Amino acid sequence: MPDIIIKDLSLKDYNLTERVKNLKDAYFKAIPEVCIERPRLITRYHLENELFEKSSISVLDKAKAYRFALENRTPVVRHTKSYENLSPQSLSVEGMIPFEIKDTSLFAGSTTSKFKGVPLYPEFLALALWPELWTISKRKSNPFYLSEEDAKELNYNIFPHWMENTIQELARKKYRPPEMKVFERLVFFLASKPNCISHTLPDFSKAINKGLRAVINEANEKRASAKLDSQIEFYSAIAESLEGIISYSRNLAIAAKKTAEKESDPVLKKELLDIAGINTRVPEFPARTFREGLTTVWLCWTAIHLENPNVGMSLGRLDQVLYELYLSDIDNEVISIADAIELLCCLWLKIGDHVPTIPEAGEQLFGGTGSNQAITIGGVDKNGNDAVNDLTYIMLRATELMKLRDPNLNARYYPGVSSKEYLERLCDANVNTGATPALHNDKAVIKALTSKGDSIEHARDYGVIGCVEPGSNGRAYGATGAILFNLTSVLELTLYNGRHRHTGMDVLISKETGDPKNFTSFDEFKNAFAEQGRWLVEQAASLNNIFGRIHQDFYPTPILSALFEGPIEKGKDIIQGGAVINSSGATIIGLADVADSLSAIQKVVFEEKIISFAGLLDALNKNFEGYPNLYCLLNNPFKIPKYGNEDTIADANVQWIIELMDKSFGEKENYRGGKYRVGYWTMTNHAGFGRLMKAMPNGRKAHKNFTSGITPVSAVTPVLTKALNSIAKQPVECLSNGVALNLKYTPEYNPLNPPLLRGNEGVVSFDKENEKKRYMMLENFAASVRAYFDGADGDMDSGNGGMEIQFNITTHDTFVDAVKHPKNHLDLLVRVSGYTAYFKDLNPQMQKEIIDRTEYLLSTGRAVYYEPFPLQTKTK
């Protein structure tokens, strides 16, 4: 265990510097602007080198394209821009306020050429914006600024070349997959590969400790002795792409030096010259200081973004990778703790310098999401020892001060190994931010990963990917968000014998597994459900593999491969199976709603025979109109088994579903020779899918939100301890792709009202009552997390217990006011299902879901109930 030098773990005496305050203010005011630089450069290279005519594109072709883009992209050192000069139409959009940006970040470079950019990838999702090119600046939800000149260039010179060259169209043309019809009906599953192949985490340690020049030399040595043409080509691609990153850094250094020559302020001039010196050295050569290490991470990160849409691409265990550099700088008085916090705050803003490309239709499913760039802190090392260090707490403080949706901070905690003080500090940060970090149980996660074949050393070195998905740091190419699987459609196909009300009862979607009206036992219904589930799993996995093969033919990833363990050793790209671990990830949406529906069917139809199956289906088709007593009964947790109440029937049905999904997906092999892993996190899809689905047997009415992640249905779990115990007893071996448990707590003290209060005459007094409430809340908070991680049996040696937990700690009244007055709550941070978002950016359906979540008082462990919040249209 590293020695903790910091005395006050809260670091409460360290606050934002003026530099960071100004940058943060600009960040929240800035207009997201569509950047067309990448598609312009990539399209130009493809045209000049006739790549569109090729039946496949080699890894070397791609590497040369990326080097071309890296060497020719704008080397932005410090943004200086006035938003006064944008067209009037952009300034008419809500939140777009004229202001000046004066960028004084300590890091050069950017994901796009804009201060807050929207990157475009025509190979993937960008063409979905084509119908919006002249309206995207005016759309109601999350508008992006796009100049008329850039819109014309996209419309005439860029997008037309990609019409038949996107991942989805290439798959359609080559394979004509029947599974595509199921996918395009939207209600069954979503496959992410047409939009990205992110959802993984690279390894920055080699770039930091050895430098990219050493990696290039290693690749050249391997190429000299390689016997296969494919390996020779791959090693050439590694060298080519990394030379591009080095050139980009040098261009930034040249631009910084030129900017310094024009700078009259001696302080700013020195800062620019420092940036020039650092970027001349790294990432080509090993980092010598903490700042150089951070710069290496950042420059590699911008290059990864150029190669791949950043959806769930994550940075891993930065407190471990950068700790030795930090400690050396502190010991040698190169930097102070305050300097380290300021550097991290600047980097956090850089990480969030872009927003995902989401078309207007996608706002209903993904609206408000960031890029879900996860950073992991804490946990144990490869030997199982406590790895929490000073940098862990410094990163936590930077996150607490910034309150940004990206990066998405995740904290690992190992029961019995991590300290009590560490857990209390994590809980304190959640109260102070209202939503972060998410907490992960090392004991359970490591057991889940090793159960799927990961070595104990690799499992102990896991980082969190995207929302909540665990993967061995820089070794596991997990594509953890490959499939988003709507479990409620499996129930629908079972209820209606292979048909779906959304697509029409005259269309047979899957297979006929029997009319439930003729079933004589609950086991018959479960068997039909399992058969429908296996059918839909086959459709989703099969199509994912088709998309994966298209990636292998047209979209190799040399930059990411260079920053991974395995590809250089094997001599092949990660998309070809070059990583050490080659799994694919599926996440299941609608678990609690489906499990409670099974319990309701078991109870009211088969056991107590309160209603026939025909009668139940009639009630569902009529959205419970004319069935008030049945509706009340199905929603009564004291009458009908509900997951989250330690009810034997309900918990058993949840476990049966979890084991069914794990087995069904686990039997499938992916296109890289690995297996599928299953998790339960939902992004905002539980709201999006909910809008498409009709009434369900658990008493949910048509078009209502589903429940997020692995969380029980809202308003049916009155006792916190029982809810946690029900979740903690689920088999972690079947949850290897991560889970999101969303809890909502009522703040029982005012975190903005510190114990030390200054009176009218400057006299300092101690607010004992507020401090007492604070202490009790944090004590109960930490105790609830410990109990959940230990599991229902309290045996922390079992390896079971809850895997993950995350929180919203904001008053009900604050959320309601934020709906009505969004401009007053620009930085209100919330946990959705795995990731953090700004509440104002969420669509109304998602805002309602968060407001309506079960809210608990930690002092009593009991739920606090409010009237269901009405669905509202966003106000301007």
Image (cartoon, rainbow, N blue to C red):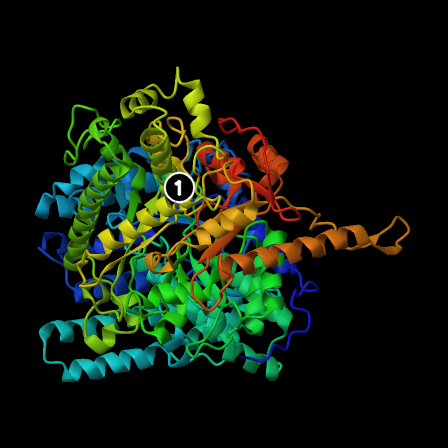
Pick the residue in front: 744 or 222: 744
Pick the residue in front: 357 or 628: 628
Q: Circle 1: is it few (<14), some (14-19), or many (20+) Cα within 10 Å?
A: many
Instruction: Name the residue at the top extreme.
Output: 626
Q: Can residue 391 be seen at all in this image of the molecule?
A: yes
Residue that numbered label 1 is attached to = 592
The correct choice, above or below, for 695 with respect to 724 in the image is above
Instruction: Name the residue at the right extreme.
Output: 761
Name the spot of residue 330 as percent of width and height, x first. 60, 79
The kind of residue on which mark 1 rests is Ala
Pick the residue in front: 588 or 474: 588
Left or right of 818 on screen, residue 537: left
Q: Residue at x 46, y 59 (%)?
A: 801
Name the spot of residue 152 as percent of width and height, x first. 29, 38
Instruction: Name the residue at the front extreme.
Output: 608
Left or right of 466 on screen, residue 674: left
Name the spot of residue 240 as percent of width and height, x first. 24, 71
Number of residue marks: 1
Pick the residue in front: 148 or 809: 809
Left or right of 143 on screen, residue 165: left
Q: Residue at x 37, y 30 (%)?
A: 608
The correct choice, above or below, for 709 with respect to 756 in the image is above
Q: Residue at x 23, y 26 (%)?
A: 517
Q: Quadrant of residue 486?
A: top left
Name the spot of residue 304 as percent of width and height, x first. 34, 62
Left or right of 44 on screen, residue 817: right
Q: Can residue 78 be seen at all in this image of the molecule?
A: no
Question: Of helix, strand and loop, which one carries label 1?
Answer: helix
The correct choice, above or below, for 657 with respect to 414 in the image is above
